[in-house]
Image (spheres, helix red, strand yellow):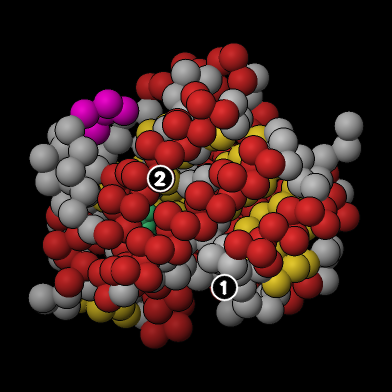
Amino acid sequence: MTEKILVIGANGQIGTELVSALRNIYGADSVIASDIKSPTYAIRHTGPFEIVNVLDHDNLHHVFNKHKPTQVYLLAAILSAVGEQKPKMAWDLNMTGLLHVLDFAVEFKVKKVFWPSSIAVFGPHSPQYDTPQYCVMDPNTVYGFSKLAGERWCEYYHDKYGVDIRSIRYPGLIGWRANPGGGTTDYAVHIFHEALKNNKYECFLSANTALPMMYMDDAIRATIALMDAPAENLTIRSSYNLAGVSFTPAQIADEIKKVIPGFEISYAANDPRQAIADSWPKSIDDTYAQKEWGWRLEYDLPKMVEDMLVNLSKVA
Ligand code: SER
């Protein structure tokens, strides 16, 4: 059976890269990109696109009915920093959007659904180092508890209605093809743009704030590997921990300085994103992902920094 893949939220940081990876694998016409906003150039010129509002039940239903997708990736979400400015809107988009998609997955017998969760599901009382898959979770951001509630819904729809839902708790994602949209880990992308443009960067997190991060190439590879894994190997239908590579702003700045010797970093005080970062894990244990679908990381910090700088200087 040929696949029809619907990607919702295709214009975002993950969507931009995922649509292009999926089109390379399945063919351009098999991957329908969709977003609430007009498509980016790369998406518009490589295959079909639909305007979609995940909160609009009838509009989303129409798109499912028209394309009858066999796989759906739901990426539309409000992230941690913007979520704190618009808490009710973040809850509504992150929850209602997911419930619409889960209901339509049942109605249209979608074979597989992917939905991203995040390290933000952990909170101040979760173990901070090598945070395990199962532990205390007391997220204190709207984004974090919308993702935690979403994980519970995913497992529920899998158990009660047989939806083959798969999910990853992404670390902060770093890529050069698209910008992040309002998260706490965004500094680790901005720093590269500013290093190349201005040779300096004022970081909104403090020098020693360690967070788990991942290069986008690894994140896309992980996503596709999880979606390709045999269903019977997967014991987790909430969301898989994924470790990535943990580093602080000072450590990534030192790595950038090896390539751009004059680069300077400074630190802004009193940014509200600091409290969010402080409530999240510093490193993650992803044993389940390794054991159940063979996950292996490729990009460590030096390799990521080199690849970011090489590619960003080509497009800048
Ligand atoms: N990158 C996200 C954020 O910072 C975490 O999932 O909000």
Which quadrant would residue 185 be assigned to in this image? bottom left
Which quadrant would residue 178 be assigned to in this image? bottom right
Q: Is residue 134 visible?
A: yes
Give the x, y percent position of residue 265.
Answer: 25, 73
Nearer to me, 99 or 22? 99
Label 2: how many Cα within 10 Å (few below 14, some 14–19, many 20+) = many
Give the x, y percent position of residue 281.
Answer: 22, 43
Q: What element carries label 1?
A: helix
Q: In this view, does 126 lie above or below 146?
A: above
Please name the amino acid that badge 2 sits on: Gly
Nearer to me, 132 or 62? 62
Q: Is residue 195 above or below residue 211?
A: below
In the image, what residue occupies the spot 24% across and 43% down?
A: 122
Q: Which of marks 2 and 1 is nearer the N terminus?
A: 2
Q: Nearer the viewer, mark 2 or mark 1?
A: 2
Return the residue at label 2.
Answer: 150
In the image, what residue occupies the spot 36% across and 49% down?
A: 147
Magenta span covers which residues?
Answer: 129-135
Q: What element carries label 2?
A: helix
Rendering quadrant holding ligand 1: bottom left
Which quadrant would residue 204 be assigned to in this image? bottom left
Alpha carbon distance from label 2 to label 1: 38 Å
Q: Residue 313's mark?
A: 1
Give the x, y percent position of residue 83.
Answer: 32, 68
Please name the amino acid that badge 1 sits on: Ser
Give the x, y percent position of residue 264.
Answer: 27, 75
